[in-house]
Amino acid sequence: MAAIKEAKVPDIGNYKDVPVIEWLVAVGDTVKPEQGLLSLESDKATMEVPAPFGGVVRELKVKVGDSVSEGTVVALIEDSAATPAEAAAARPAAAPEASAPEPAKSPEPVPAVPAPAAAPPAADLARATASPPIAFDSSQVMPQSVPYASPGVRAFARELGVDLAQVSGSERKGRIGRADVSAFVKSSLAAAPATRSSASAAGGGLNLLPWPVIDFARFGEIEAAPLSRIKKISGANLARNWAMIPHVTQHDLADITELEAFRKKLAEENKDLKVTPLVFQIKALVAALKKFPQFNASLDASGENLILKKYFHVGIAVDTPEGLVVPVIRDCDRKGLLDLAGELGTLSAKARDRKLGPAQMSGGCISISSLGGIGGTAFTPIVNAPEVAILGVSKAAIQPVWDGKEFKPRLLLPLSLSYDHRVIDGADAARFTAYLAQQLGDIRRLLL
Ligand code: CAO
Protein backbone atom coordinates (compact mmCIF):
# COMPACT_ATOMS: atom_id res chain seq x y z
CA MET A 1 0.00 0.00 0.00
CA ALA A 2 1.42 3.35 -0.99
CA ALA A 3 1.99 6.04 1.64
CA ILE A 4 2.23 9.76 1.21
CA LYS A 5 5.39 10.97 2.88
CA GLU A 6 7.14 14.29 3.30
CA ALA A 7 10.33 15.09 1.40
CA LYS A 8 12.39 17.52 3.47
CA VAL A 9 15.51 19.60 2.97
CA PRO A 10 18.37 17.52 4.41
CA ASP A 11 21.19 18.76 6.60
CA ILE A 12 22.68 21.87 5.01
CA GLY A 13 24.75 22.84 7.98
CA ASN A 14 23.94 26.10 9.72
CA TYR A 15 22.63 27.78 6.62
CA LYS A 16 19.11 29.04 6.59
CA ASP A 17 16.70 30.65 4.18
CA VAL A 18 18.32 29.45 0.98
CA PRO A 19 16.21 30.47 -2.03
CA VAL A 20 14.55 27.90 -4.28
CA ILE A 21 15.46 28.76 -7.86
CA GLU A 22 13.99 25.90 -9.85
CA TRP A 23 11.71 22.89 -9.55
CA LEU A 24 13.15 19.89 -11.39
CA VAL A 25 9.98 17.78 -11.10
CA ALA A 26 6.24 18.39 -11.35
CA VAL A 27 3.18 16.94 -9.63
CA GLY A 28 2.51 13.49 -11.10
CA ASP A 29 6.18 12.78 -11.93
CA THR A 30 7.69 9.51 -10.76
CA VAL A 31 11.01 10.08 -9.03
CA LYS A 32 13.77 7.69 -8.04
CA PRO A 33 15.60 7.83 -4.70
CA GLU A 34 18.29 10.55 -4.81
CA GLN A 35 16.82 12.16 -7.92
CA GLY A 36 17.01 15.96 -7.71
CA LEU A 37 13.68 17.52 -6.74
CA LEU A 38 14.53 21.19 -6.77
CA SER A 39 17.55 23.49 -6.94
CA LEU A 40 18.64 25.90 -4.23
CA GLU A 41 21.05 28.66 -4.95
CA SER A 42 23.25 30.65 -2.67
CA ASP A 43 25.29 33.44 -4.22
CA LYS A 44 28.18 31.08 -4.96
CA ALA A 45 26.78 27.63 -5.49
CA THR A 46 23.76 25.74 -6.68
CA MET A 47 22.70 22.47 -5.12
CA GLU A 48 19.88 20.03 -5.54
CA VAL A 49 17.59 18.68 -2.84
CA PRO A 50 17.41 14.96 -3.57
CA ALA A 51 14.32 12.76 -3.17
CA PRO A 52 14.84 10.77 0.05
CA PHE A 53 12.88 7.87 -1.50
CA GLY A 54 11.25 6.99 -4.78
CA GLY A 55 7.58 7.46 -5.66
CA VAL A 56 5.09 9.74 -7.33
CA VAL A 57 5.17 13.47 -6.57
CA ARG A 58 1.75 14.38 -5.18
CA GLU A 59 2.21 17.97 -4.04
CA LEU A 60 4.86 20.70 -4.17
CA LYS A 61 4.98 22.53 -0.85
CA VAL A 62 7.26 25.42 -1.80
CA LYS A 63 7.54 27.59 -4.87
CA VAL A 64 10.37 29.26 -6.74
CA GLY A 65 11.48 32.27 -4.74
CA ASP A 66 10.64 30.72 -1.35
CA SER A 67 13.50 30.30 1.09
CA VAL A 68 14.07 26.95 2.75
CA SER A 69 16.21 25.56 5.56
CA GLU A 70 17.01 22.13 6.94
CA GLY A 71 13.75 20.28 7.65
CA THR A 72 11.54 22.40 5.41
CA VAL A 73 8.98 20.12 3.75
CA VAL A 74 9.34 20.69 0.02
CA ALA A 75 7.04 18.04 -1.41
CA LEU A 76 4.68 15.18 -0.64
CA ILE A 77 5.65 11.98 -2.39
CA GLU A 78 3.62 8.81 -2.61
CA ASP A 79 6.16 6.20 -1.60
CA SER A 80 5.18 3.03 -3.40
CA ALA A 81 7.86 1.05 -1.55
CA ALA A 82 6.45 1.84 1.93
CA THR A 83 5.34 -1.07 4.10
CA PRO A 84 1.64 -1.28 5.04
CA ALA A 85 2.52 -0.22 8.58
CA GLU A 86 4.37 2.79 7.26
CA ALA A 87 1.44 3.60 5.01
CA ALA A 88 -0.95 3.55 7.94
CA ALA A 89 1.40 5.58 10.09
CA ALA A 90 2.15 8.08 7.39
CA ARG A 91 -1.40 8.90 6.36
CA PRO A 92 -2.53 10.96 9.37
CA ALA A 93 0.84 12.70 9.50
CA ALA A 94 0.58 13.68 5.85
CA ALA A 95 -2.94 15.10 6.05
CA PRO A 96 -4.12 15.45 9.63
CA GLU A 97 -7.09 17.70 8.93
CA ALA A 98 -8.41 15.53 6.16
CA SER A 99 -8.41 12.31 8.16
CA ALA A 100 -9.29 13.61 11.63
CA PRO A 101 -12.91 12.93 12.57
CA GLU A 102 -15.18 15.89 13.27
CA PRO A 103 -17.85 14.39 15.53
CA ALA A 104 -20.03 17.52 15.73
CA LYS A 105 -20.53 17.75 12.00
CA SER A 106 -19.97 14.24 10.81
CA PRO A 107 -21.71 11.29 12.39
CA GLU A 108 -19.95 8.85 10.06
CA PRO A 109 -17.18 6.73 11.53
CA VAL A 110 -13.59 7.57 10.75
CA PRO A 111 -12.70 5.75 7.53
CA ALA A 112 -10.96 2.53 8.37
CA VAL A 113 -7.41 2.02 7.30
CA PRO A 114 -7.65 -0.14 4.17
CA ALA A 115 -6.57 -3.73 4.64
CA PRO A 116 -2.90 -4.09 3.86
CA ALA A 117 -2.17 -5.34 0.40
CA ALA A 118 0.20 -8.25 -0.09
CA ALA A 119 3.54 -7.59 1.59
CA PRO A 120 5.97 -5.95 -0.79
CA PRO A 121 8.83 -8.11 -2.03
CA ALA A 122 11.88 -8.24 0.22
CA ALA A 123 13.98 -6.48 -2.41
CA ASP A 124 11.59 -3.52 -2.38
CA LEU A 125 11.76 -3.35 1.39
CA ALA A 126 15.52 -3.44 1.28
CA ARG A 127 15.52 -0.62 -1.26
CA ALA A 128 13.14 1.44 0.83
CA THR A 129 15.17 1.08 3.97
CA ALA A 130 18.51 1.38 2.22
CA SER A 131 17.92 4.89 0.94
CA PRO A 132 18.90 7.14 3.84
CA PRO A 133 18.65 10.89 3.43
CA ILE A 134 21.59 12.18 1.44
CA ALA A 135 23.86 14.30 3.59
CA PHE A 136 24.92 17.61 2.13
CA ASP A 137 28.50 18.55 2.81
CA SER A 138 27.48 22.14 3.15
CA SER A 139 30.90 23.29 4.28
CA GLN A 140 32.16 22.56 0.81
CA VAL A 141 29.36 23.89 -1.32
CA MET A 142 28.05 26.83 0.66
CA PRO A 143 29.82 30.07 1.45
CA GLN A 144 30.44 30.94 5.07
CA SER A 145 27.26 33.00 5.18
CA VAL A 146 24.49 33.22 2.69
CA PRO A 147 23.37 36.76 1.89
CA TYR A 148 19.60 37.08 2.17
CA ALA A 149 18.08 38.14 -1.15
CA SER A 150 15.45 37.00 -3.60
CA PRO A 151 16.45 35.13 -6.79
CA GLY A 152 15.51 38.23 -8.82
CA VAL A 153 17.88 40.40 -6.79
CA ARG A 154 20.58 37.71 -7.04
CA ALA A 155 20.22 37.64 -10.81
CA PHE A 156 20.39 41.46 -10.87
CA ALA A 157 23.54 41.41 -8.72
CA ARG A 158 25.13 38.73 -10.91
CA GLU A 159 24.44 40.78 -14.01
CA LEU A 160 26.29 43.72 -12.47
CA GLY A 161 29.08 41.56 -11.08
CA VAL A 162 28.19 42.52 -7.50
CA ASP A 163 29.26 40.19 -4.69
CA LEU A 164 26.16 40.14 -2.46
CA ALA A 165 28.28 39.28 0.56
CA GLN A 166 29.53 42.88 0.46
CA VAL A 167 26.07 44.47 0.27
CA SER A 168 24.09 45.32 3.40
CA GLY A 169 20.37 44.77 3.20
CA SER A 170 18.01 47.55 4.21
CA GLU A 171 14.84 45.49 4.02
CA ARG A 172 13.14 43.53 6.79
CA LYS A 173 15.51 41.17 8.66
CA GLY A 174 18.44 42.54 6.64
CA ARG A 175 17.14 41.23 3.32
CA ILE A 176 18.97 42.77 0.36
CA GLY A 177 16.75 44.52 -2.18
CA ARG A 178 17.35 45.79 -5.70
CA ALA A 179 17.82 49.31 -4.31
CA ASP A 180 20.58 48.07 -2.00
CA VAL A 181 22.44 46.57 -4.98
CA SER A 182 22.05 49.78 -7.00
CA ALA A 183 23.23 51.87 -4.05
CA PHE A 184 26.25 49.58 -3.65
CA VAL A 185 27.17 49.97 -7.33
CA LYS A 186 26.77 53.77 -7.14
CA SER A 187 28.95 54.07 -4.05
CA SER A 188 31.58 51.73 -5.55
CA LEU A 189 31.69 53.80 -8.74
CA ALA A 190 31.95 57.02 -6.76
CA ALA A 191 34.77 55.60 -4.68
CA ALA A 192 36.54 53.99 -7.62
CA PRO A 193 38.61 56.90 -8.98
CA ALA A 194 40.01 57.72 -5.55
CA THR A 195 40.62 54.06 -4.74
CA ARG A 196 42.19 53.47 -8.15
CA SER A 197 44.63 56.30 -7.91
CA SER A 198 45.63 55.59 -4.33
CA ALA A 199 45.78 51.85 -5.02
CA SER A 200 48.00 52.29 -8.05
CA ALA A 201 50.17 54.75 -6.18
CA ALA A 202 50.55 52.19 -3.41
CA GLY A 203 50.94 49.33 -5.90
CA GLY A 204 47.92 47.46 -4.47
CA GLY A 205 44.54 46.47 -5.91
CA LEU A 206 43.95 44.70 -9.19
CA ASN A 207 43.25 47.90 -11.15
CA LEU A 208 41.37 45.93 -13.76
CA LEU A 209 40.02 47.67 -16.79
CA PRO A 210 36.27 47.28 -17.26
CA TRP A 211 35.24 44.38 -19.49
CA PRO A 212 35.09 45.59 -23.12
CA VAL A 213 31.56 46.19 -24.35
CA ILE A 214 31.55 45.51 -28.08
CA ASP A 215 28.78 45.28 -30.62
CA PHE A 216 30.15 42.21 -32.44
CA ALA A 217 27.33 42.35 -35.00
CA ARG A 218 29.13 45.33 -36.51
CA PHE A 219 31.82 42.94 -37.73
CA GLY A 220 29.68 40.10 -39.08
CA GLU A 221 26.91 37.64 -38.33
CA ILE A 222 26.67 36.49 -34.72
CA GLU A 223 24.52 34.35 -32.44
CA ALA A 224 24.24 34.57 -28.62
CA ALA A 225 24.43 31.23 -26.77
CA PRO A 226 23.78 31.39 -23.01
CA LEU A 227 26.37 29.74 -20.76
CA SER A 228 25.18 26.59 -18.97
CA ARG A 229 24.57 26.79 -15.22
CA ILE A 230 27.64 24.61 -14.57
CA LYS A 231 29.81 26.89 -16.71
CA LYS A 232 28.56 29.97 -14.86
CA ILE A 233 29.28 28.46 -11.45
CA SER A 234 32.62 26.89 -12.35
CA GLY A 235 33.59 30.06 -14.25
CA ALA A 236 33.08 32.20 -11.16
CA ASN A 237 35.13 29.78 -9.06
CA LEU A 238 37.92 29.53 -11.64
CA ALA A 239 38.11 33.32 -11.95
CA ARG A 240 38.37 33.73 -8.17
CA ASN A 241 41.00 31.00 -7.88
CA TRP A 242 43.04 32.41 -10.76
CA ALA A 243 42.92 35.94 -9.35
CA MET A 244 43.48 35.09 -5.68
CA ILE A 245 45.98 32.22 -5.80
CA PRO A 246 49.54 32.94 -6.88
CA HIS A 247 49.92 30.03 -9.29
CA VAL A 248 53.11 28.41 -10.48
CA THR A 249 53.16 25.28 -12.66
CA GLN A 250 55.96 22.73 -12.40
CA HIS A 251 56.38 20.49 -15.46
CA ASP A 252 58.03 17.09 -15.50
CA LEU A 253 58.04 13.82 -17.45
CA ALA A 254 57.42 10.34 -16.06
CA ASP A 255 58.79 7.33 -17.89
CA ILE A 256 55.75 5.03 -17.96
CA THR A 257 57.09 2.43 -20.43
CA GLU A 258 56.85 -0.45 -17.93
CA LEU A 259 53.70 0.89 -16.31
CA GLU A 260 51.96 1.01 -19.67
CA ALA A 261 52.87 -2.62 -20.46
CA PHE A 262 51.41 -3.67 -17.11
CA ARG A 263 48.33 -1.46 -17.57
CA LYS A 264 47.59 -3.02 -20.95
CA LYS A 265 47.82 -6.50 -19.43
CA LEU A 266 45.54 -5.49 -16.55
CA ALA A 267 43.05 -3.88 -18.96
CA GLU A 268 43.08 -7.04 -21.10
CA GLU A 269 42.29 -9.17 -18.03
CA ASN A 270 39.52 -6.84 -16.84
CA LYS A 271 37.55 -5.97 -19.91
CA ASP A 272 34.46 -5.06 -17.89
CA LEU A 273 36.41 -2.09 -16.43
CA LYS A 274 38.18 0.79 -18.14
CA VAL A 275 41.71 0.60 -16.75
CA THR A 276 43.34 3.81 -18.00
CA PRO A 277 46.60 5.46 -16.87
CA LEU A 278 44.53 7.69 -14.58
CA VAL A 279 44.12 5.07 -11.83
CA PHE A 280 47.91 4.69 -11.62
CA GLN A 281 48.23 8.47 -11.38
CA ILE A 282 45.78 8.48 -8.45
CA LYS A 283 47.86 5.87 -6.60
CA ALA A 284 51.11 7.74 -7.33
CA LEU A 285 49.53 10.98 -6.14
CA VAL A 286 48.49 9.38 -2.84
CA ALA A 287 52.07 8.15 -2.32
CA ALA A 288 53.37 11.69 -3.00
CA LEU A 289 50.79 13.25 -0.64
CA LYS A 290 51.95 10.90 2.11
CA LYS A 291 55.59 11.91 1.57
CA PHE A 292 54.81 15.65 1.25
CA PRO A 293 51.92 16.36 3.68
CA GLN A 294 51.92 20.11 2.93
CA PHE A 295 50.29 19.24 -0.40
CA ASN A 296 47.42 17.48 1.40
CA ALA A 297 46.34 20.72 3.04
CA SER A 298 44.18 23.83 2.83
CA LEU A 299 44.58 27.35 4.13
CA ASP A 300 41.90 28.15 6.68
CA ALA A 301 39.56 31.12 6.20
CA SER A 302 41.94 33.50 8.04
CA GLY A 303 44.76 32.51 5.67
CA GLU A 304 47.02 32.11 8.68
CA ASN A 305 46.81 28.38 9.38
CA LEU A 306 47.33 25.34 7.27
CA ILE A 307 44.81 22.55 7.82
CA LEU A 308 46.66 19.26 7.27
CA LYS A 309 44.44 16.37 6.21
CA LYS A 310 44.92 12.76 7.24
CA TYR A 311 42.62 11.39 4.56
CA PHE A 312 43.26 10.96 0.83
CA HIS A 313 40.33 12.02 -1.33
CA VAL A 314 41.19 12.84 -4.95
CA GLY A 315 39.05 15.03 -7.23
CA ILE A 316 38.94 14.16 -10.93
CA ALA A 317 38.05 16.86 -13.47
CA VAL A 318 35.44 15.42 -15.80
CA ASP A 319 34.52 17.01 -19.08
CA THR A 320 30.74 16.97 -19.65
CA PRO A 321 28.62 18.56 -22.37
CA GLU A 322 27.44 21.11 -19.75
CA GLY A 323 30.95 21.98 -18.57
CA LEU A 324 33.60 20.88 -16.13
CA VAL A 325 32.70 19.07 -12.88
CA VAL A 326 35.01 17.54 -10.27
CA PRO A 327 33.68 14.41 -8.55
CA VAL A 328 35.78 13.16 -5.65
CA ILE A 329 37.01 9.61 -5.10
CA ARG A 330 37.30 9.10 -1.36
CA ASP A 331 39.93 7.14 0.57
CA CYS A 332 42.11 6.42 -2.47
CA ASP A 333 44.81 5.11 -0.14
CA ARG A 334 42.56 2.20 0.80
CA LYS A 335 41.50 1.28 -2.72
CA GLY A 336 43.20 -0.91 -5.31
CA LEU A 337 43.70 -0.07 -8.97
CA LEU A 338 40.63 -2.03 -10.06
CA ASP A 339 38.41 -0.49 -7.35
CA LEU A 340 39.55 2.94 -8.50
CA ALA A 341 38.86 2.05 -12.15
CA GLY A 342 35.32 0.94 -11.23
CA GLU A 343 34.61 4.04 -9.16
CA LEU A 344 36.06 6.36 -11.77
CA GLY A 345 33.78 4.81 -14.39
CA THR A 346 30.70 5.19 -12.18
CA LEU A 347 31.48 8.77 -11.16
CA SER A 348 32.29 9.99 -14.67
CA ALA A 349 29.09 8.38 -16.03
CA LYS A 350 27.11 10.09 -13.24
CA ALA A 351 28.85 13.39 -14.02
CA ARG A 352 27.90 13.18 -17.67
CA ASP A 353 24.29 12.29 -16.76
CA ARG A 354 24.20 15.24 -14.31
CA LYS A 355 23.47 12.84 -11.46
CA LEU A 356 26.24 13.90 -9.06
CA GLY A 357 25.12 15.19 -5.67
CA PRO A 358 26.99 17.85 -3.68
CA ALA A 359 28.40 15.16 -1.36
CA GLN A 360 30.10 13.48 -4.32
CA MET A 361 31.76 16.73 -5.35
CA SER A 362 33.14 17.81 -2.02
CA GLY A 363 35.94 16.97 0.36
CA GLY A 364 38.75 16.64 -2.20
CA CYS A 365 42.37 16.96 -1.05
CA ILE A 366 43.93 17.49 -4.49
CA SER A 367 42.61 17.23 -8.05
CA ILE A 368 43.75 15.65 -11.30
CA SER A 369 42.89 17.17 -14.63
CA SER A 370 43.74 14.63 -17.31
CA LEU A 371 43.73 15.72 -20.91
CA GLY A 372 45.85 12.70 -21.78
CA GLY A 373 43.09 11.00 -23.73
CA ILE A 374 42.87 14.06 -25.98
CA GLY A 375 46.37 15.40 -26.56
CA GLY A 376 48.81 18.17 -25.70
CA THR A 377 52.25 18.23 -24.18
CA ALA A 378 51.69 20.51 -21.15
CA PHE A 379 49.17 22.97 -19.71
CA THR A 380 48.57 25.06 -16.60
CA PRO A 381 45.58 23.74 -14.63
CA ILE A 382 43.94 26.10 -12.14
CA VAL A 383 44.09 25.09 -8.47
CA ASN A 384 40.68 24.02 -7.16
CA ALA A 385 40.49 26.09 -3.93
CA PRO A 386 40.75 25.44 -1.06
CA GLU A 387 43.07 22.70 -2.30
CA VAL A 388 46.68 23.83 -2.74
CA ALA A 389 47.69 21.88 -5.85
CA ILE A 390 46.31 20.25 -8.96
CA LEU A 391 47.99 17.73 -11.24
CA GLY A 392 47.54 18.25 -14.97
CA VAL A 393 48.31 15.27 -17.18
CA SER A 394 48.91 15.42 -20.94
CA LYS A 395 49.24 12.74 -23.57
CA ALA A 396 52.02 10.17 -23.17
CA ALA A 397 54.28 9.86 -26.21
CA ILE A 398 57.30 7.80 -27.23
CA GLN A 399 60.47 9.91 -27.06
CA PRO A 400 64.19 9.14 -27.36
CA VAL A 401 65.85 8.98 -23.95
CA TRP A 402 69.65 8.83 -23.53
CA ASP A 403 70.63 5.98 -21.20
CA GLY A 404 74.33 6.91 -21.03
CA LYS A 405 75.23 4.84 -24.09
CA GLU A 406 72.45 5.28 -26.58
CA PHE A 407 69.02 6.74 -27.19
CA LYS A 408 66.18 4.38 -26.28
CA PRO A 409 62.53 4.81 -27.22
CA ARG A 410 60.60 5.37 -23.97
CA LEU A 411 56.97 6.28 -23.27
CA LEU A 412 56.98 9.61 -21.43
CA LEU A 413 54.01 11.06 -19.60
CA PRO A 414 53.91 14.87 -19.23
CA LEU A 415 52.96 16.07 -15.73
CA SER A 416 52.00 19.71 -14.98
CA LEU A 417 51.59 20.45 -11.29
CA SER A 418 50.06 23.86 -10.52
CA TYR A 419 50.36 24.93 -6.90
CA ASP A 420 49.51 27.74 -4.51
CA HIS A 421 52.81 29.51 -3.99
CA ARG A 422 51.60 30.96 -0.68
CA VAL A 423 51.68 27.45 0.76
CA ILE A 424 54.20 25.57 -1.36
CA ASP A 425 57.72 26.56 -2.27
CA GLY A 426 59.08 25.94 -5.75
CA ALA A 427 61.71 23.50 -4.49
CA ASP A 428 59.06 21.40 -2.74
CA ALA A 429 56.91 21.40 -5.88
CA ALA A 430 59.90 20.20 -7.92
CA ARG A 431 60.57 17.46 -5.35
CA PHE A 432 56.91 16.46 -5.26
CA THR A 433 56.66 16.23 -9.05
CA ALA A 434 59.95 14.34 -9.36
CA TYR A 435 58.76 11.88 -6.69
CA LEU A 436 55.48 11.45 -8.55
CA ALA A 437 57.39 10.72 -11.77
CA GLN A 438 59.59 8.26 -9.88
CA GLN A 439 56.53 6.43 -8.52
CA LEU A 440 55.00 6.19 -11.98
CA GLY A 441 58.34 5.13 -13.43
CA ASP A 442 58.79 2.21 -11.04
CA ILE A 443 55.63 0.21 -10.86
CA ARG A 444 56.94 -1.92 -7.97
CA ARG A 445 56.93 1.18 -5.72
CA LEU A 446 53.41 2.03 -6.81
CA LEU A 447 52.12 -1.36 -5.82
CA LEU A 448 53.69 -1.22 -2.35
N1 CAO B 1 48.33 9.47 -22.37
C1 CAO B 1 47.96 8.69 -23.39
N2 CAO B 1 46.75 8.09 -23.44
C2 CAO B 1 45.91 8.31 -22.43
C3 CAO B 1 46.24 9.12 -21.33
C4 CAO B 1 47.52 9.70 -21.32
N3 CAO B 1 47.91 10.50 -20.33
N4 CAO B 1 45.20 9.15 -20.50
C5 CAO B 1 44.23 8.41 -21.02
N5 CAO B 1 44.66 7.88 -22.20
C6 CAO B 1 43.94 7.00 -23.10
C7 CAO B 1 43.15 5.98 -22.32
O1 CAO B 1 43.92 4.85 -22.01
C8 CAO B 1 42.04 5.68 -23.29
O2 CAO B 1 42.56 4.82 -24.28
P1 CAO B 1 41.67 3.63 -24.90
O3 CAO B 1 40.50 4.31 -25.53
O4 CAO B 1 42.61 2.99 -25.86
O5 CAO B 1 41.28 2.77 -23.75
C9 CAO B 1 41.79 7.01 -23.97
O6 CAO B 1 42.96 7.79 -23.76
C10 CAO B 1 40.58 7.77 -23.45
O7 CAO B 1 40.65 7.85 -22.04
P2 CAO B 1 39.47 8.58 -21.23
O8 CAO B 1 39.66 10.03 -21.32
O9 CAO B 1 38.18 8.04 -21.68
O10 CAO B 1 39.68 8.00 -19.77
P3 CAO B 1 40.58 8.58 -18.59
O11 CAO B 1 40.44 7.60 -17.48
O12 CAO B 1 41.93 8.91 -19.02
O13 CAO B 1 39.86 9.94 -18.18
C11 CAO B 1 38.10 11.39 -17.52
C12 CAO B 1 38.57 9.94 -17.61
C13 CAO B 1 36.73 11.38 -16.94
C14 CAO B 1 39.03 12.19 -16.62
C15 CAO B 1 38.14 12.01 -18.94
O14 CAO B 1 37.22 11.33 -19.75
C16 CAO B 1 37.87 13.47 -18.99
O15 CAO B 1 36.73 13.94 -18.86
N6 CAO B 1 38.94 14.26 -19.21
C17 CAO B 1 38.83 15.71 -19.37
C18 CAO B 1 39.30 16.45 -18.15
C19 CAO B 1 39.15 17.96 -18.35
O16 CAO B 1 38.35 18.43 -19.11
N7 CAO B 1 39.95 18.72 -17.66
C20 CAO B 1 39.80 20.14 -17.75
C21 CAO B 1 41.08 20.81 -17.79
S1 CAO B 1 40.98 22.48 -17.39
O17 CAO B 1 39.62 22.99 -17.92
Image (spheres, grey):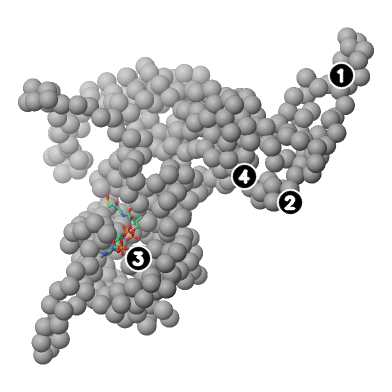
Observer-side mark, 2 or 1, equals 2
* Type of amino acid at the residue the image marks with label 3: Thr
Residue at left offset 26%, top offset 61% = 372
Horizontal side of residue 308 vs 369, given as left or right? right
The quadrant of the picture occupied by the C terminus is bottom left
Observer-side mark, 3 or 4, equals 3
Q: Where on the image, by quarter, is ligand 1? A: bottom left
Distance from disc 3 to disc 4, alpha carbons, whole Å, reads 33 Å
Distance from disc 2 to disc 4, alpha carbons, whole Å, reads 21 Å
Would you name the residue on which mark 1 appears? 101
Observer-side mark, 1 or 3, equals 3
Horizontal side of residue 378 vs 128, given as left or right? left
* Vertical order, 55 against 339 (above or below): above
Marks 2 and 4, the one that precedes in the sequence: 2
Would you name the residue on which mark 3 appears? 276
Would you name the residue on which mark 4 appears? 133
* Type of amino acid at the residue the image marks with label 1: Pro
Indicate if the residue with disc 1 has its beta carbon within 8 Å of ligand 1. no
Q: Position of residue 207 (x, y in %)?
A: 17, 37
Q: Which mark is residue 122?
A: 2
Marks 1 and 3, the one that precedes in the sequence: 1
Distance from disc 4 to disc 1, alpha carbons, whole Å, reads 33 Å
The quadrant of the picture occupied by the N terminus is top right
* Vertical order, 64 against 382 (above or below): above
Confirm or deny contact between disc 3 and disc 4 (CB under 8 A). no
Observer-side mark, 2 or 4, equals 2
* Type of amino acid at the residue the image marks with label 4: Pro
